[in-house]
C-alpha cells in the first residue's frame, strides 16, 4: 500500500468530518448569507415605510394638510399606538397638544381628549397588558 492510501485509510473519519465541515460552510455562504441580506434589506425598507407613515399620521393629526377633522384626529391618535419605536415622542406630542390646543369644555374636543388619554395610558402600560387589552 502506498503512503497516500495508508494516510487515507488511517484518517478516513477525520477526512469525512472535514468534508462535511466544508460542505456546511459552503452551504452557509451560498444559502444563509443571501437570506440574511434579504431580511436586513426588508427590515430597512419596513423601517422607512413606518417612518413615512408615522409622519403622515402626525401631519393629519396636526392639520398640516389642511384643517384637521375631529374623527380623523381620533383615528390617528388610536393608530399612533402601533408605532412602539415612537412612543416616547408620541407621548410628548399628545400631552403638549392636549394642554396647549384642546379645550375640554367643548364637547366635540372632549372625544379627542378621551382618546388621547386612552392612548397615553396604552403607551405607559407594559407590553403584556397591551397585548391582551382589547381597547
Image (cartoon, helix red, strand yellow):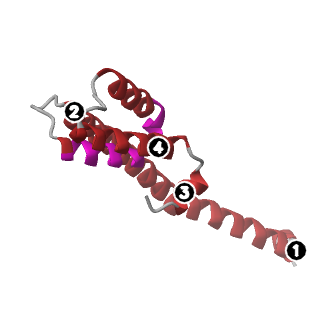
Which residue is label 3 attached to? 29
Of the pair 96 and 58, the residue shown nearer to us: 96
On the image, the x and y values in percent for residue 117 come to 42, 40
- Mark 2–mark 3 contact, CB under 8 Å? no
Which residue is label 4 attached to? 84
Which residue is label 1 attached to? 6
For mark 2, give the secondary structure: helix
Between the residue at mark 2 and the residue at mark 1, the CA separation in whole angstroms equals 77 Å
Query: Against 30, is 51 above or below?
Result: above
Between the residue at mark 4 and the residue at mark 1, the CA separation in whole angstroms equals 64 Å
For mark 4, give the secondary structure: helix
Pointer 4 or 1: first along the chain: 1
Between the residue at mark 1 and the residue at mark 3, the CA separation in whole angstroms equals 33 Å
Query: In the image, is 40 to the left or to the right of 50?
Result: right
Which residue is label 2 attached to? 59
Query: In the image, is 108 to the left or to the right of 120?
Result: left
Pointer 4 or 2: first along the chain: 2
- Mark 1–mark 3 contact, CB under 8 Å? no
Q: Give the mark toward the camera: 4 or 1.
A: 4
Q: Is residue 76 magenta?
A: yes
State the extent of the magenta-drawn residues as a range. Answer: 71-88
Q: Give the mark toward the camera: 4 or 3.
A: 4
Residue furthest right in the image: 10
Q: Is residue 13 magenta?
A: no
Amino acid at each position: 500500500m502506498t503512503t497516500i492510501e495508508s494516510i487515507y485509510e488511517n484518517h478516513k473519519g477525520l477526512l469525512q468530518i472535514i468534508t462535511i465541515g466544508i460542505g456546511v460552510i459552503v452551504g452557509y455562504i451560498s444559502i444563509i448569507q443571501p437570506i440574511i441580506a434579504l431580511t436586513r434589506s426588508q427590515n430597512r425598507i419596513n423601517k422607512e415605510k413606518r417612518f413615512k407613515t408615522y409622519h403622515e399620521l402626525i401631519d393629519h393629526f396636526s392639520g398640516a394638510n389642511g384643517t384637521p377633522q375631529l374623527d380623523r384626529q381620533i383615528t390617528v391618535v388610536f393608530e399612533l399606538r402601533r408605532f412602539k419605536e415612537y412612543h416616547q415622542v408620541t407621548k410628548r406630542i399628545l400631552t403638549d397638544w392636549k394642554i396647549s390646543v384642546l379645550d375640554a369644555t367643548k364637547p366635540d374636543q372632549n372625544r379627542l381628549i378621551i382618546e388621547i388619554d386612552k392612548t397615553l395610558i396604552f403607551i405607559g402600560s407594559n407590553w403584556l397588558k397591551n397585548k391582551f387589552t382589547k381597547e
